[in-house]
Image (spheres, helix red, strand yellow):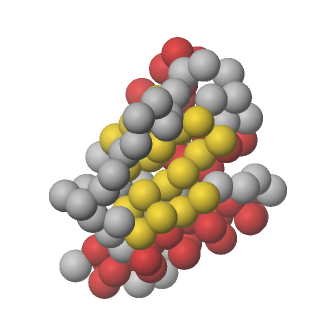
Amino acid sequence: MWDERYSEPGFAYGTEPNDFLKEEYKRIPAGGRVLCLAEGEGRNAVFLAEQGYEVTAMDLSEVGLHKAQQLATDKGVTIRTQVADLADYEFGVNSWDAIISIYR
C-alpha cells in the first residue's frame, strides 16, 4: 500500500516539515540521536538533520525511504534509513535521545 502511494510523482505530504515539529524540535537535546517512526518520504527526518541531529528514518516502505534519501541529498544532509515493521522493531536500550512519530 505505502510503496504504491510513494511511487507517485512528488511527495505525498510535501517536503516541508510538520508545523508542530518545527515549533517543538528544540526540546530534543542538541545533536542528539533521533528515530523517526513511520517516516515515509523523510520530510521530518531531513528537517531534523538540517538542525544538526543524527537521524534514522524508519518506515515499512522502501520506496518512501528511497525518496527520503534523495531529499536528504538534495538538501545536503545525511540521514540513515531502515526498512522495518514496528511490530518487529527492536528499539534498543538508551539508543535514542528522542523518538518522533508524526502523521501529516
Q: Is residue 9 or residue 99 the one in the foreground?
A: 99
Residue occupying image coordinates x 34% and y 80%: 3
Residue occupying image coordinates x 30% and y 56%: 89
Task: Please say whether residue 85 is visible from this viewpoint.
Answer: yes
Instruction: Say which quarter of the image contains residue 88.
Output: bottom left
Q: Residue furthest right?
A: 76
- Relative side of 40 to 79, left or right: left
Residue occupying image coordinates x 75% and y 53%: 77
Above or below: residue 40 compared with residue 8? above
Estimate the x, y position of residue 40 in percent, counting from the top left: 41, 62
Instruction: Say which quarter of the image contains residue 59.
Output: bottom left
Instruction: Say which quarter of the image contains residue 70.
Output: bottom right
Above or below: residue 50 compared with residue 67? above
Residue occupying image coordinates x 71% and y 41%: 50
Estimate the x, y position of residue 85 in percent, counting from the top left: 27, 64
Estimate the x, y position of residue 29 in percent, counting from the top left: 60, 19
Estimate the x, y position of residue 35 in percent, counting from the top left: 47, 43
Q: Is residue 29 or residue 101 the one in the foreground?
A: 29
Quadrant of the rendering where the N terminus is positioned: bottom left
